[in-house]
Amino acid sequence: MSKLRVLIWNEFVHENIHEKVKSIYPQGIHEKIKTELISCGSDFQISTATLEEPDHGLTDAVLSETDVLIWWGHMAHNKVEDTIAKKVQSRVLQGMGFIALHSAHFSKVFKLLMGTTCDLKYREAGEKERLWVCNPGHPITEGIDDCLEIDSTEMYGEPFDIPPPDEQVFISWFEGGEVFRSGNCWRRGNGKIFYFRPGHETYPIFHNKAVIQVIYNAIKWAAPQGLWLSSLAHVPVNQAREKIEDRGD
Amino acid sequence: MSKLRVLIWNEFVHENIHEKVKSIYPQGIHEKIKTELISCGSDFQISTATLEEPDHGLTDAVLSETDVLIWWGHMAHNKVEDTIAKKVQSRVLQGMGFIALHSAHFSKVFKLLMGTTCDLKYREAGEKERLWVCNPGHPITEGIDDCLEIDSTEMYGEPFDIPPPDEQVFISWFEGGEVFRSGNCWRRGNGKIFYFRPGHETYPIFHNKAVIQVIYNAIKWAAPQGLWLSSLAHVPVNQAREKIEDRGD
Amino acid sequence: MSKLRVLIWNEFVHENIHEKVKSIYPQGIHEKIKTELISCGSDFQISTATLEEPDHGLTDAVLSETDVLIWWGHMAHNKVEDTIAKKVQSRVLQGMGFIALHSAHFSKVFKLLMGTTCDLKYREAGEKERLWVCNPGHPITEGIDDCLEIDSTEMYGEPFDIPPPDEQVFISWFEGGEVFRSGNCWRRGNGKIFYFRPGHETYPIFHNKAVIQVIYNAIKWAAPQGLWLSSLAHVPVNQAREKIEDRGD
Amino acid sequence: MSKLRVLIWNEFVHENIHEKVKSIYPQGIHEKIKTELISCGSDFQISTATLEEPDHGLTDAVLSETDVLIWWGHMAHNKVEDTIAKKVQSRVLQGMGFIALHSAHFSKVFKLLMGTTCDLKYREAGEKERLWVCNPGHPITEGIDDCLEIDSTEMYGEPFDIPPPDEQVFISWFEGGEVFRSGNCWRRGNGKIFYFRPGHETYPIFHNKAVIQVIYNAIKWAAPQGLWLSSLAHVPVNQAREKIEDRGD
């Protein structure tokens, strides 16, 4: 079997304008995730793309050769072209896996796929988060014990305005008193979608081995298992499966 | 209890340019549905709106006073302004009911709410359709026997690219050999959505009492039961439910 | 419209053998819930039934006149007759609402309806619980702010082995660090099912007005909207909707 | 990777008492499915078991070494011991795949997993069935074109009283005018469940290569991806993730 082709997309803005973020992710969040995925022994063919590249690095050619797309964005969601966001949505519906990290809950692609506001509560106080496994045998939780702890992070709280997940993999507990559905699976068209909450830019979240393990697992889970190039299809009367007369006008 | 406020939206184009459609729906599909809903004894406060009105008749004031919006469109989906389609989506997520009829599977609002292509097969041969009730006790099927027959109509066939319905109310059988999920319920945000397949413009579908009965039932089912004005909400550290120190940067 | 007929079922064992429980619920948990529902101004016709009554108070006649059944049980789940548990399941599938409180996650009826183990984590330390509203416009949350707090209670924690809820209404945060899906809606057959976590016997949970408010709301939500007496139904060849020849053996 | 361990269970009664069934399946339906799966080039380790074996051939040892269980039963559902049916349910929840064929909609195991009546309509007239693919990219549809036709079979019709499937793979059209959800996926606990309608005993359904192809695909889809030995788990106060005092009684 050929290697899974993974594309890590990062808006790559914070890292250039915010000293603390730069110190945590000197080559950018995308490069850090790539490095960590490689060092955890994955056998993926990994590429990266960023906002400032032509077409945000998401040309038809690139998308047609991507099995799973990982998305990180925060302050520049609106700089993503609508046409490109829709093209990505379209590829997901055909079968490409899509993993939205943290603030990507507000990315154009994720919101297009969900159809809801994706609103939530938030607070940035460097508090503790604990993600509980809701289904211990799920492939996305492989290698994770009954929970995953992050010492210091931003809080996201319910209500999280999303369609009911097909599978609830993680729910988070926060030190300040909130909860959040933090690992959620959906299928849309032929594509698999995973939202994973961890990943704030001013905390070294992607230095956490357990977080990388979940992303690694999610990539394998989201891998396409077939392609569905859906279309509005006309069926002429003489090709109906049962013989019928045309009684239309 | 005050009356349910129902708004019937019709693009109202076919009826002006196509003689057969005009003969079946001289005042337009919207007026026919309104008349039928009234004559079946409903106690709704019914309004109508069409594409050519300013803001397509869907101003903020109108939407804020609508409980359930019925949508019919076919050849002019693209003439609906994106901003207005998004405003309607937004109202549905807050709690307004939304009923998409027939070719409204391709309306901007419905596609925004689903997040999928909403593609399907079709054929226009005036063939027979039989909608089977999948859940005989569901309020949307009240007054309908085990199925509902339409002598002559356009065919829609699977695959219908939609998210899995929360409730499957009807599935259609077609004379030419196809099947279709023709009565589908979803909740998104705080709103209830019903897709109902019958309704082609060149057949007198909305003259059919059973079709009107289902629309009547669906209006009552989709009525808002509360309002959720979701928003991205910041929770300051000193308003956290549990006392925490700000350890952020 | 006639009054909703609510039946509150309680195994009524703890109250007779445990002094602390007796002091909190001298007439039993069922009578306390009844009293509170009445005093919050509800317009229900409320009955009660307990384990020790003949047929556990759940005769065919009683069930046929019940719109919504509330269930509390803990230490005597196994004393409920299988045939009666199945009869209740059957009524729910026909349309009777079913509300399972707290330890009723392990009741025979709830487990039969879910089809899963309904296992969970637990700890009894009198800790704080905070139930967050996941969908603020949902009728079950009417009158509840963004969360509902219980000062001192038993903990239930994930993983909770249930089928994915159709609607997630509440998720709980616990002082000791766990989370739990504590307000869950399902539809099965024609019936609506609500699981609500609060209700431990050694804490005065049903003295809490907000808890009673949720139960009140859930009763209205779970009210049957029609009846479906499902059956295995033979369709003779000569009653097929389309004319066919019998080509069977 | 080691081979998938597939167990084909058949009640094996019809084949012994009904001449026509014996002529179509001289070694039994289980042996025919096994032979066909082997001849289509599958790389499974396939066993069989039948009702008359001790423990119906479903001992703890056998179940613990089964990855995917295929079930065929019709006239002897009630002869399956309740304890064994519950043991099988339990294994499915832990992660074993379960494929219910045709009349297994009424098997004890399937009904336990669904929690509903699983009632449906039926007619035996040797009529045509056409199963339409609802999601062309789904792994269970691999190698199947847009539909799968069976010339002569028993009819099953809606309403089919099941919980909403997580994924709708096939919907059937029948010559006599009915429709049926004939390929349905669910996840329960950690297990994957597929119901597939084809398979009546008096028609040579399992001689049909496309039917075997779907079963082959479904086995691969239902393969366990991990194990979840769920249990009711006590968390002592001193093992709480957050330090708490015991304030219980």
Image (cartoon, coloured by chain):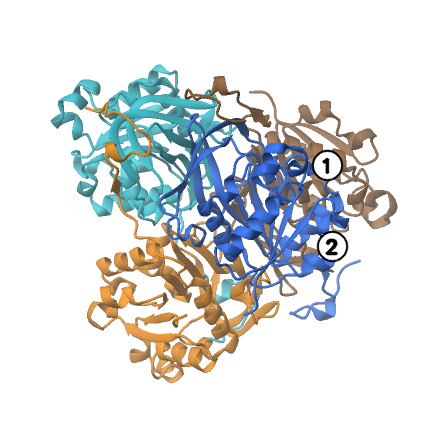
Chain colours: A brown, B blue, C orange, D cyan
Residue A103 pos. (x, y %): 71, 48
Residue marked by disc 1:
A85
From the image, state whether disc 2 or disc 1 is nearer to you. 2
Rendered location of residue D117, percent (x, y):
30, 48
Q: Quadrant of residue D52?
A: top left
Q: Is residue B121 left or right of residue C43?
A: right
Say left or right for B203 vs D30: right
Residue at which label 2 appears:
B59
Amino acid type, mark 2: Thr
Q: Which label number is shown at residue A68?
A: none
Q: Chain of mark 1?
A: A
Total numbered badges shown on the rendered structure: 2
Dot 2: within a 10 Å radius of its alpha carbon, few (fewer than 14), some, or many (20 or more) residues?
few
Residue A150 makes an appearance in the image: no
Q: For mark 1, give the secondary structure.
A: helix
**Residue B104 against residue C71 in the figure, above or below:** above
Query: Whole-Å distance between the Cαs marked 2 and 1?
Result: 28 Å
Q: Residue at x 22, y 24 (%)?
A: C248
> What crowding class fits label 1: few (fewer than 14 Cα within 10 Å), some (14-19), or many (20 or more)?
some
Q: Secondary structure under badge 2?
A: loop
Residue closer to the observer: B229 or B157: B157
Could you tell whether B113 is left or right of C221 in the image? right
Q: Foreground residue, C155 or C140?
A: C140
Residue D193, above or below A227 = below
A233 relative to A219, above or below:
above
Quarter of the image with the N terminus of chain D in it: top left
Residue A156 in view = yes
Q: Chain of mark 2?
A: B
Kind of residue at disc 1: Ala
In the image, residue D132 sits, relative to residue C19, either above or below, namely above
Q: Position of residue C20 (x, y in %)?
A: 38, 81
Q: Please identify the quarter of the rendering in which residue B68 is found.
A: bottom right
